[in-house]
Structures are given as C-alpha cells and as structure tokens.
C-alpha cells in the first residue's frame, strides 16, 4: 500500500529569456556611432547609407545622424519585384 498520493509531473518549469527584437530607433531620432537601430530575425529591414549589419542581422549606425526609413524595389526570381524596407542614417 502506498503511504503517499502519487504526484504529477511538472512540464512547465523551464524559463527562457526574451529576445528583445524589434525597432530600437524610429525615423527622425538621433543615432550615435554603433547604436542599435533594429534587432531582427532574417532581413526584414535592409541596411542603407551609413548603416551596418551584424552577423545576427542587427542593424547599427556607422555615423552620427538621424534615422530614416524607406523602401527599395528588388527584382527577384522570374522578374518578380519585391518591395523591401531600408534603414539609413542621414549625417547632420
């Protein structure tokens, strides 16, 4: 005979830190050298003028200025055009 009631198994005990993705600096905001503009998975935003891209696709400022968002048309497979978003830093 059991002296204790059987306990259930716990399935939801592990915790994972959030990834903190998204836009960090919006259009018109001031950017310093090295400041993160967008953290993303994949290339939702492409780097424009004075913007670099890290190995995890993070976009950061290469020069001091203001952030500006825009669009670019890319011709892809089978001559289909895609509109991609770009991020640039305009120098003062």
Image: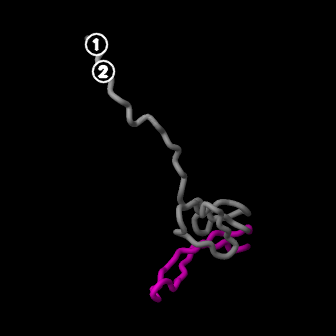
Magenta-colored segment: predominant secondary structure: strand
- Residue 84 % position (x, y): 52, 76
Q: What whole-number distance in Å separates the C-alpha atoms at marks 1 and 2?
A: 9 Å
- Residue 86 % position (x, y): 57, 74
Instruction: Identify the magenta region.
Output: 63-92
Marking on residue 71: none
Identify the residue at image location x=53%, y=83%.
74
**15 vs 50: above or below:** above
- Residue 6 % position (x, y): 30, 21
Return the residue nearer the eye: 27 or 8.
8
Quarter-wise, where is residue 90 in the image?
bottom right
Marking on residue 6: 2
Q: Secondary structure at mark 2?
A: loop
The answer to if 84 sits in the magenta stretch is yes
Q: Secondary structure at mark 1?
A: loop
- Residue 47 % position (x, y): 62, 72
Return the residue nearer the eye: 43 or 6.
6
Quarter-wise, where is residue 65 in the image?
bottom right
Return the residue nearer the eye: 41 or 85.
41
Residue ID for mark 1: 2
From the image, which quarter does the N terminus lie in? top left
């Amino acid at each position: 005979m059991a002296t204790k009631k059987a306990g259930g198994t716990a399935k939801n005990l592990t915790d994972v830190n959030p990834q903190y993705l998204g836009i960090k600096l919006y259009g018109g905001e001031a950017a310093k050298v090295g400041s993160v503009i967008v953290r993303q998975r994949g290339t939702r935003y492409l780097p424009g003028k004075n913007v670099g891209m890290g190995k995890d696709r993070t976009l950061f400022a290469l020069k001091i200025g203001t952030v500006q968002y825009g669009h670019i048309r890319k011709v892809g497979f089978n001559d289909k055009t895609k509109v991609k978003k770009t991020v640039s830093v305009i120098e003062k």
